[in-house]
Amino acid sequence: MSSVVPASVTRAQLAIMEPPATVGAQPGGVIARLPLQFNPSSLVLRKSSEWRRTPSRMAAESALPEFVGSGPRSLSMEVFLDATATHDDSVEKAVEQLMTACVPTPASLARKKPASPWIRLDWGTSSTTSFNGVLTGLQVTYSLFDVDGKPLRATCSFTIDEASVDTPGQNPTSGSMEARSTHRVIAGDSLPLLAWREYGDATAWRTIAEANDIDDPMVLVPGVELIVPGIDEPTRGGRS
């Protein structure tokens, strides 16, 4: 009798990144990664388009709508935090990480161009809900406290508004020899999956493998931080 091995659950996480130093650039390094304790039960994705109609002189006719432009994507979600099993301060620490995405980073203040971090939801191979954006609203509802007043449960509701409008599947770092980011490996990660998230092309995993001297693209050690170069950036293997 054969046994069926259940597939491992892919955990969602939030990446909080340094904002771009210049307009049109990609975000800088990862400031923090917040693995979600529980995967979202629902995600609300919004996108708007603007149309214009020129009034028709004939009452029986209707002018054709003219496309004016498309608005950015907006992703609303709730994150549930629970520390009833450990009674530690993990709930408050997670909330503090989210709050860092609401204020300018020290690096942007040093450049005298205050900007809040960019944030992205990473969850499996999802591409419609995984985009670089900014946190436009955060509401935290604490629902359970320890005897000393420490929050043990919280629901965090927030919205991410798209900060760049690259065509889906387009490599955001293409054409830039200096563009690169980092990624901290979590359970279930693989190089093809990471290549799909970063470049929109799972077959581009060799770019990441060569930059990090990785032989097996399917075996990654959780906790290790990988360099994710621009797709056109020379890898270490290609340098003389």
Image (cartoon, helix red, strand yellow):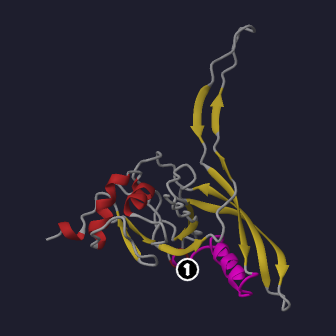
Query: 27 or 193: nearer the eye?
Result: 193
Residue 217 in picture, x, y percent from top left: 33, 65
Quarter of the image for residue 137 reads bottom right
Residue 72 point in image, percent of width and height: 59, 48
Can residue 176 be seen in this snapshot? no
Residue 87 horizontal side relative to residue 133, left or right = right
Q: Is residue 93 above or below residue 74?
A: below
Observer-nearest of 95 and 113: 95
Where residue 118 sits: x, y (%)? 56, 65
What stretch of residues is rendered in magenta? 84-107
Q: Quadrant of the C terminus?
A: bottom left
Residue 104 magenta: yes
Neighbor class of circle 1 (other Cα within 10 Å; few <14, some 14-19, many 20+) is few
Residue toward you, 1 or 51: 1
Residue type highlighted by circle 1: Pro
Does the magenta run of residues contain 215?
A: no
Q: Find the residue positioned furthest to the front.
A: 1
Q: Which residue lies most toward the left here? A: 240
